Amino acid sequence: MAINYCSLASGSSGNCHFVGSETTRILVDAGMSHRYIKKALESIGQRIDQIDGIVLTHEHIDHIKGLKTMVKKEELKVYVNRKTFECLKEKVREEDLEKFVIFEKFVDLTLGDIQIKSFEILHDAVDPLGYRFCHGGKTLSIVTDIGAMTDSVKANILPSDFLVLESNHDVNMLLYGSYPYPLKRRIMGERGHLSNEDAAKTVFEVFKQGRLKSVVLAHLSKDNNMPELARLTMQKYLEERGVDTEYEINLDLSYRDKIGKVYRIV
C-alpha cells in the first residue's frame, strides 16, 4: 500500500498536483488547462476520466484556471470549503454546481481509500487551506501559497513522510529585483509567499521532530528564484545543522513548465 505523488505544474502560471493510491486518484487544484492536465496525466500513466475528485486549496486563478472546463467535460467531484466556493461558484456553469462538495474545515474527508485532513494557512485568499493525505500508514502533506509558517501548520505537517512545500523566493533577489515595492511587500508579508530560508527552517524542524524522508520544493518564482538556488539554500541550512542531505532526506524540485518525478511513498 502506497501513496503516489507527482507535480503536474507548480508556480504562478498554474498549479496542479496528482495524489493517488492503487484505487483512488485525486488532483490538488486545477490551475492549468483541461488539455494540459489531460496530457500530463497520460504522461504518468493516468487517465483524466479516472480522477475521483479535485481538492481545491484556494480561489486564485493559478489554482482554478482549468476548473470550469474540467467540471464541464469530466464526471468528477470538486471538494472545497464554503468561503472558497462562494468566491468561485459564478466561474462555472450553473448546471455543474452539483459537482461541488462543500466541506467544513478541520473535518476529515475520505476519498476512496485516502483520508484527507485540511488545515488553515496564511495567504491573501478568502480561506486558503493546506492538506494532509494518509493511506497505508504513510502521510503526504501539500502546503503552497503560504506567507508565514505558524505553529498550527507545523503541527499539521509534523506526521509527514513526504512534504510538498512552497519555496517561492530568494529574499535578496526579490528585494533587488524589478518588482514594484507594493508587490514586494505583498510577497514578503505574512499572507504572501514563503522564502527559501523560511522553507528550509520549516523542513529542519519537521525533520528533527517527525519522520520526514522526502521534500519537494514548490511554487518557485520565475523572477525571484532559481531552482538550484532553492535547492542549495535548503541543503546548506540542513547540512549546517547536521542533516545528511544525501542519505537522511531526499530533496527535489517541482516546475512551472514541466512535470515532476512520480513518487511512490511506501
Image (cartoon, rainbow, N blue to C red):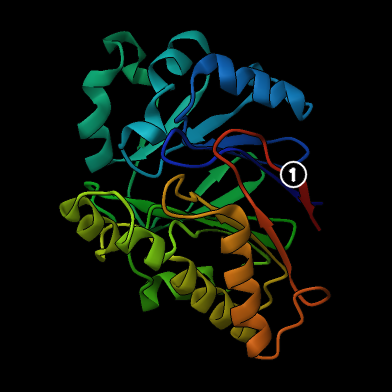
Note whether 154 is above or below 133 in the view shown: below
Using the rendered view, name the quadrant where residue 36 is placed: top right
Q: Position of residue 69 (x, y in %)?
A: 43, 13
Decide if residue 225 is on the left or right side of residue 114.
left
Using the rendered view, name the quadrant where residue 174 is placed: bottom left
Q: Residue at x 41, y 39 (%)?
A: 12
Q: Nearer the viewer, residue 143 or 231?
A: 231
Q: Is residue 133 visible?
A: no
Q: Residue at x 81, y 73 (%)?
A: 246
Q: Position of residue 67 (x, y in %)?
A: 41, 22
In terms of secondary structure, where does tag 1 sit? loop
Q: Which residue is mark 1?
A: 261
Decide if residue 156 is on the left or right side of residue 120.
right
Amino acid carrying mark 1 in the image: Lys
Note whether 239 is above or below 199 in the view shown: below
Q: Nearer the viewer, residue 138 or 221?
A: 221
Q: Position of residue 122 (x, y in %)?
A: 30, 61
Q: Nearer the viewer, residue 184 or 152?
A: 184
Q: Is residue 226 visible?
A: yes
Residue situated furthest left in the rendering: 182
Q: Residue at x 35, y 74 (%)?
A: 150
Q: Nearer the viewer, residue 179 or 185?
A: 179
Q: Residue at x 52, y 68 (%)?
A: 157
Quadrant for the C terminus, please. Answer: bottom right
Decide if residue 52 is on the left or right side of residue 171.
right
Q: What is the crowding at mark 1: few (fewer than 14 residues within 10 Å), some, or many (at least 20)? A: some
Q: How many marks?
A: 1
Q: Position of residue 170 (x, y in %)?
A: 44, 63
